[in-house]
Amino acid sequence: MQAHLTRRYRFSASHRLHSAELSEAENRATYGKCNNPYGHGHNYALEVTVSGPVDLATGMVCNLVDLDGFVEREVLARYNLENLNTRKEFSQIVPTTENLCMEIFEILQRGFKRAHLEKVRLEETMMNSFEYAGENELRT
């Protein structure tokens, strides 16, 4: 039997949306208040969805202790209370929540092998959330 598990995590981080490819005026027009030179922060809600057969012995898709430990070490410890603009992975790309969501997916895809990673959903505000299910899922 195949099942899906979605686990929710929280972390806080700051960023400034600013592209070196755009002029100051274009950055202000594109990113508005999110282009503030001092940055701004968010309390993110991260949802990680994995799938797999339900283990007959445990009754679970994956061991929650393993999943929680991996997300804590590889995602939360990396980004919680950080300025995303100072992170190496955002040195060439704007640290939008879309890009952060894709980065988190790639981190989880590379390292967590105990269940199939279906998607990552990242809620930035009550009004904005982003999902990413990998490049292969986006092609139609």
Image: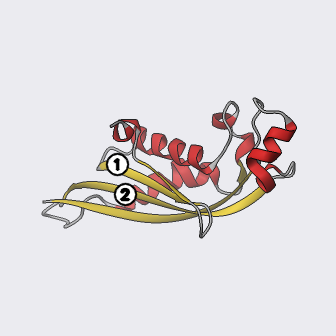
In the image, what residue occupies the spot 66% across and 34% down? 93
Residue 25 in the image, given as x and y percentages of width and height: 86, 40
In the image, is 138 to the left or to the right of 82?
A: left
Q: Earlier in the sequence, mark 2 or mark 1?
A: 2
Instruction: Determine crowd level at label 2: few under 14, some 14-19, many 20+ residues with C-alpha closer than 10 A.
Output: some
Label 1 near label 2: C-beta < 8 Å? yes
- Residue at label 2? 49
Instruction: Determine crowd level at label 1: few under 14, some 14-19, many 20+ residues with C-alpha closer than 10 A.
Output: many
Q: Amino acid at mark 1?
A: Leu
Q: Quadrant of residue 94?
A: top right
In the image, is 18 to the left or to the right of 49?
A: right
The quarter of the rendered structure image containing the C terminus is top left
- Looking at the rendered structure, the secondary structure element under dot 2 is strand
Q: Nearer the viewer, residue 125 or 90?
A: 125
Residue 86 in the image, given as x and y percentages of width and height: 75, 41
In the image, what residue occupies the spot 12% across and 63% down? 56
The quarter of the rendered structure image containing the N terminus is bottom left
